[in-house]
Image (cartoon, rainbow, N blue to C red):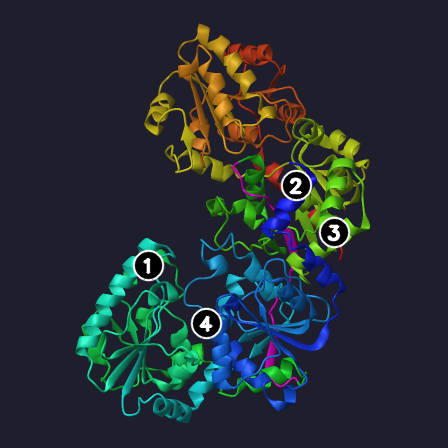
Amino acid sequence: MSILTKIKTKLKSGTWYPFYNSFYEKEKIDPKMVLLESRSGRGLESNIFVILQELNKKEYEDYPVILAVRKGYESGVWEKLKHYGLKIDKMIPFGSISYYRYLSRAGFLINDSTFPGRFIKKEGQVYLNVWHGTPLKCMGRDNVDERYSMGNVMRNLLMSDYLLYPNRFMEEKMTGAYMLQNLYQGEIIHDSYPRNEIFFHSEQGEKLKKELGLQGKQITVYMPTFRGKADAVDSDSAVERVKEYLQTCDQLLRDDQVLLVKLHPFVGNALEFHSYRHIRRFPQVYDTYDILNMCDVLVTDYSSVMYDFANSGKRIILFAYDIEDYTGSRGMYEDIRQYPFPLVRTAEELVSLLDSPGDYLTREFREKYCTYETGEGVGRICRHVILGEKECRVSHMASNGLENVLIYAGDFQQNGITMSFLNLMKELDTNKYNYFISYRMNSLKDAPWRLDCLPKNANVYPIASEMNMDVFTGICQMLYLKFGIRSKRLGHAYDREWKKHFGDSDFKAVVHYNGYENYMISLIGHAPFRKIIWVHNDMEEELKEKKNPSRYVLQDAYSSYDQVAAVSRDIVRSVCRIGGRKDNITVIPNCQDYGGILLRAQEPVAFEKETRCTVSRDRLTEILDKKDIKFISIGRYSAEKRHDRLMEAFDRFWKEHKDSWLIIMGGAGNLYEEACRSAEKLSCADHIILIKTIRNPMPVLKKGNLFILSSDHEGLPVVLFEAGILGVPAIATDVSGSHCFMEDYGGVLVEPSVEGVYSGMLRFMEKEICPLTINCKENNKKSLELFYGLLKNSSN
């Protein structure tokens, strides 16, 4: 595909949004313009709605208001504006060209969720985030399923000038879930949620009852959390279940009782209400919180609306008929069974409780979940943020006093780099620095399970989006990668990218541990902090074979980064030749989790869903338990590992030793199928076992008689450490990376050829190959001292 075809394809798909870069660079900020966005443009709700009401007052008449709304929601929003007599200066389609123009122009940005991944807050803009609810369900880092995809939420919160927290519980959970401590530099406003002020005006609720012809009736609102997924099967199931409950309620309710139902659109839009006598659809044109203020009882389950409604002092009933299933599939911060509200599981129980007397709310509950609610917050908030009158109670994010270090780890594929990174993280002293692990969300989209290797409490900082590209920047990028032609435009684009992802976050140093990926090497190269890049392989050989990353990118990185950390003496010469410098290179051997390796080796052999193998797990276990000779190799299925060489050498050996086996295990790499085809052509095919993506290869390695590394080049082979720790003898080809390692630890080197590997197998049979002698504790200690040395010498 030509570069012009690529550009046309990207423009047609809308992924480049080439106009946004121009808006960001050229549009002047209107210091009085206010851009409002509610639920990513899906209406005009709650906090944003009440803020708009405040902005319609005379003191803001000089502040033009722009409202972003998605296509399909405009008519409902216009109807609501008309009903409440509210004015806006312009409604713009969410995600449109005009949307990004105003996103670059507005002096004040107010959102209850997040702006898109390509958004960058400009110098001079003021961002107020009024997050849409107090979290009961686990969020961000606390929700394993969200950890890979939380990047855009995290960066939106971090770039906000003001975060609004109406209670202590919300502040604690949001701060922890998105790791704001030690990073967030704006102000935290401790004040009322704007939408909750209505609960302090019961007279307005009575007035609305009359307006709707409901005076003298007991009004109950049912607002459950949506269950299942947005597909037909789950939606149909949810609809049928809700229908069943509502039908029973309708039969049991009296004529002076009305149940108003507000369901998720996936369910609610599929329900017909005309057949019910006592149940009605939630009024459409009214704000949700006006209706809640009118009602006498709230029925919900796992929704944060209960925390808001508690400000009214009225009754709350939890209709949690599926609490065991729901809490088992979705992590929750607290057990609602401990809350001071009755919890029912049937429609009969629910209706019987509607007339029960009693104030279920406790002082402790209100103090925890309604801490700063006074009923007068929106005026103070708008004057504080927009008029600069500083009326709100504010605080700044607490810090533990340690400096921050950002480490880009890559995509966590099953390879030596990932293992080395995890070993380093286990050894690092978290009392020295705050470490934030970064990765690209797109690279984990199809395999989020890879993050399972991280500790649950690890600080993460996901990179939420790819490069904000335009046509001319794209051409500059191509010229740089292909021909090394550098331009100010491209450099400026990467400065902009850094600001997009990390804003004003402060780091002592930024570490590119992965060492690959053109985009990330260039991005970190433009970080306004000390920059360190790791080298895990002989990159000259990598460039010859894969041409990835670009030689020009590596050349600039190795020459401009403050420090280059090479994992082996063998690859220093290669780094020098690429970067033209030697003074910034430090040799830091990889750390080893020797205790973890020993423990993992005790586990049974296990195949995961993603594992592929030429034999079954049971057959593999059977072979491992035999007294036959078992040669083991571990390495990604890529050309430099030379599995073809290894299999040919084994084919010669097997013809003389039919009681021998070759087992090759690998994760990343795209040559697994080719390796299988090559194995099938050999006479020893039935004695070669190929495994792709096994999360714990240690039980297999432990049962091996000889470990063989047949590569053309290496960095610092982690697998040789692992073999040494498990006491498995090893041989390796005499190539860059392996040479110094085997020299240091008393290993045996063989010629990098079929004949050389075959001779190593024969030497093993002559008992000439012994396990390596490795003092991992001393090795780790030395590596850590060198790593801390790189950070210690840095200064912002």
Q: Which mark is residue 5?
A: 2
x and y, in percent, of residue 173 in the image: 48, 67
Magenta span dominant secondary structure: loop
Foreground label between 3 and 2: 2
Q: Earlier in the sequence, mark 1 or mark 4?
A: 4
Q: Earlier in the sequence, mark 3 or mark 1?
A: 1
Cα–Cα span, label 3 and label 1: 47 Å
Q: Is residue 681 above or below residue 158?
A: above
Query: What amino acid is labelled 1 in the image?
Result: Ser
Cα–Cα span, label 3 and label 4: 37 Å
Q: Which mark is residue 134?
A: 4
Disc 3 marks which residue?
A: 526
x and y, in percent, of residue 305 in the image: 40, 75
Query: What amino acid is labelled 3 in the image?
Result: His
Q: Are marks 1 and 2 in contact (CB under 8 Å)?
A: no
x and y, in percent, of residue 716 in the image: 63, 31
Query: What amino acid is labelled 4 in the image?
Result: Thr
Quadrant occupied by the C terminus: bottom right
Q: Is residue 3 above or below residue 249?
A: above
Cα–Cα span, label 1 and label 4: 26 Å
- Few, some or many C-alpha atoms within 10 Å of disc 1 (few <14, some 14-19, many ≥20)? many
Disc 1 marks which residue?
A: 235
Query: What amino acid is labelled 2 in the image?
Result: Thr
Q: Which quarter of the figure has residue 380?
A: bottom right
Foreground label between 1 and 4: 1
